[in-house]
Amino acid sequence: MSYGSPNNKPLEITFDWLFDRINQEDVYLKYFGFCQINKKFCNPLRNDNKADCWFYWNKGVLYFHDPAWKQTYTCVNIVMHNERVSYFKALNIVYDLFFSNHTVTNYVVTRNKKESKPKDIKVKVQSFTSTDIEYLKQFGITSEFCKKAKWYSIQHYWIDDNMMYTYNAYNPCIGYYFAGKWKLYFYKSKTSYRFLSNTNKDIIQGWNMLPESGNLLVITKSFKDVGTLYEQGITAIAPQAESILLPENIIDNLKSRFNKIYSLMDYDNTGINLAWKMRKLYKIQPLFFTDKLWNRKGGYRGAKDISDYRKEFGYEQTKQLIEQLL
C-alpha cells in the first residue's frame, strides 16, 4: 500500500494524527513481516521457539503482547525497540517510512488463502456478556433467535488442542454452531480476519430453522442478516460466504417449499455477481440496498444491508421498508 503524502506535516506528530492516516497493521508488517489477529505466533524480534505472542485491539490501538517480555507494545513501541530511539523519534520514523514515497508492498501479510482450515475447533461457551448483548441488540437479534440458531458467546477456543483465545471486551467472539462445526465471528475486529471456521460450503446458515413450507424466503449474505430478518418476521438463509452459489438441488428443494424466493445481497461487485447468477440460473429476483444504480458504497439511506438498516432506523421503519419491497 502506498500512502503518498499527507496534506501537512505538523510540527509535533502525535499517535492519533499519524494513525488516522495510516494503518497500524502496516507498521507491524514492516518490522515483523506479518500481522494476523486471533493467532498465536513466535516473536520474530528475538530467538523464540514458543508460539505464545499475539495481537489484540484495545480502544482503537493494535497491541502486541509477548509474555516473555512481560510488556505490551504498540507499533510505535516496536519501532522504538528496534531502532533504539525515543518515542517522538519513532513517530517521525514511521512518518518518513510511509509518507516519503515508500510503500509496504514488500511486507506482505502471511495470509495464504489456500491454507487448510483448522481440522478441529473446540470451544468453551459462556453466557452472553453485556458487550455481546448490546452488539446483537443493535440489529434486533434476541436471545430467542440465538437459542434457535445455536449462537454462543465464546470464552475460549482451541485449535487442534492448542488454546488460541480468551474472551475480552475489546475482541469479543460469537460462535455459530453447525452439528460439530464452528464458525467464530470476532465482531469488533478491524481487520479482514473477522471469521475463523472449519465449516464448508455445504453448510447453509439458517437451514435448520426453516419451516416445512411458507410463503416467502429470502436468500441473503450473512447469518447476522438472517437474524435481523427473522426478528422482522421474514424467513431467511445464507450461504457460508457471499461468493458461494447454492446448488440447483437446494434451490429446487426451496422452490417446492416456498411460494416466493428473493435474494438480498450487498450492492457491491461480489453481491451483484451472485444475485445475477441466481437470477439467470434459478429465476430468483434480486433485491439490493441502494439509492442509485451506480451508488455501490452508499447503500440505502446510508445502510449497506438489512442489519445496518435495522440498527439505524429501528423495527418499525425496517418493517415498512420490507413491506414496500416485498
Image (tube, rainbow, N blue to C red):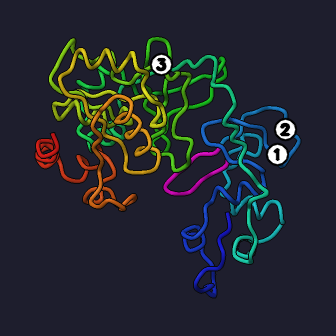
Q: Which amino acid does label 2 sit on?
A: Asp
For the image, the number of numbered tags is 3
Mark 1 vs 3: CB contact within 8 A? no
Q: Residue at x 84, y 33 (%)?
A: 49
**Closer to the camera in the image, 152 or 59:** 152
Tell which tag, 2 or 3, sits nearer the viewer. 3
Q: Report how far apart the C-alphas of labels 2 and 3 lie in the structure.
A: 40 Å
Write down the region rendered in magenta. 55-64
Crowding near pointer 3: few (<14 within 10 Å), some, many (20+)?
few
Mark 2 vs 1: CB contact within 8 A? yes
Q: Is residue 236 magenta?
A: no
Residue pointed to by mark 1: 44
Residue pointed to by mark 2: 48
The image quadrant where one finds the N terminus is bottom right
**Closer to the camera in the image, 249 or 23:** 249
Relative vertical location of residue 74 with respect to residue 193 in this rendering, above or below: below
Q: Which residue is drawn at 52% across and 20% down?
A: 123
Q: Report how far apart the C-alphas of labels 2 and 1 lie in the structure.
A: 7 Å
The image quadrant where one finds the C terminus is top left
Q: Which residue is drawn at 23% across and 27% down?
A: 217
Q: Position of residue 250 (x, y in %)?
A: 37, 17
Crowding near pointer 2: few (<14 within 10 Å), some, many (20+)?
few
Q: In this view, does 269 lie to the left or right of 122?
A: left
**Closer to the camera in the image, 74 or 318:** 318
The kind of secondary structure element at disc 2 is: loop
Residue pointed to by mark 3: 202
In the picture, the disc for residue 109 is none
Q: In this view, does 278 lie to the left or right of 192?
A: left
Relative vertical location of residue 57 with respect to residue 276 in this rendering, above or below: below
Mark 2 vs 3: CB contact within 8 A? no
Q: Report how far apart the C-alphas of labels 1 and 3 lie in the structure.
A: 38 Å
